[in-house]
Amino acid sequence: MNFFSNIQPYLNLVGISTWQTLIMVFFSTLFALIIGFPLGVLLNCTNKYGITPKPVFNSVLSRIIDVLRSFPFVILMIVLLPFTRLVLGTAIGTTATIIPLSIAAAPFVARITETALNEVDPGVVQAARAMGSTNFQIIWKVLIPEATPSVVSGITLTIINLISYSAMAGTLGGGGLGDLAIRYGYQRFNTTIMIASVVVIIIMVALIQFFGTKISNRMMSKR
């Protein structure tokens, strides 16, 4: 009973921080998909082998995405502090961290989507074109369904990266397991909290990788 009483505060802290991390990762993944997936489709469709080649537009968009991808997350988060404060009225906390996380992940999602779409057999696209399909129909009914297993694998990697980014966000008061490890573990020399935070993150990553791989393999088997 005494042992349980001693670890109860730690369990509460880890539980709250885990929930904060899950919230950050879920919503940032959602917003990254909303932004990044259409950009990835645009990159694929406008390249020189795409269904609507637009080399200049594709080159400009590609460079913008590469610039955003090159920003280290901590620096990106600092740069976005004024924007986050303008939108939400605060630049710290779990909710505020979702904005930089989403912007950091969106270019990654765009490249993943582009790569997955590039792997679709050109013969399938040509067959759809021969049957009179419009560009929208080719995108919606051919390219996206064919690329979905690879996109799911990419999203799995994105979520894992976001867990890592969310831990780094703790250095700037972003909440979650990273914040817990720094404020209650490192700064207060509490090794138990630090170990617990790392273990929870490892478990989260392992579960996401397992289910992501399983879903992707199942989709592949049904193609």
Image: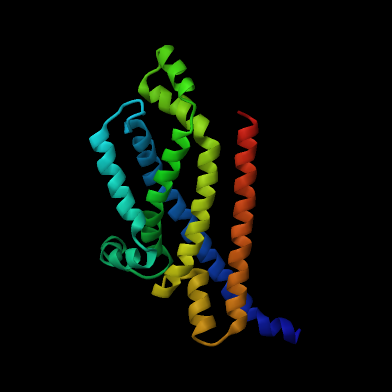
Q: Residue furthest top?
A: 131
Q: Is residue 204 visible?
A: yes
Q: Position of residue 94 (x, y in %)?
A: 43, 66
User: Which residue is at the far front?
Assistant: 48
- Viewer can see residue 89: no
Quadrant containing the N terminus is bottom right
Give left or right: position of 194 versus 129: right
59 shown above or below 184: above
Q: Is residue 110 above or below residue 95?
A: above
Residue ranking furthest to the left: 56
Task: Where is residue 117? Give x, y as percent.
Answer: 45, 34
Looking at the picture, how far across and down is residue 79, in whole percent? 28, 65
Whether 142 is drawn above or below 89: the answer is above
Whether residue 96 sits left or right of residue 83 in the image: it is right
Residue 94, placed above or below residue 206: below
| Residue at the outermost right position | 1
Which residue is painted at 37% across and 46% down in the image? 35
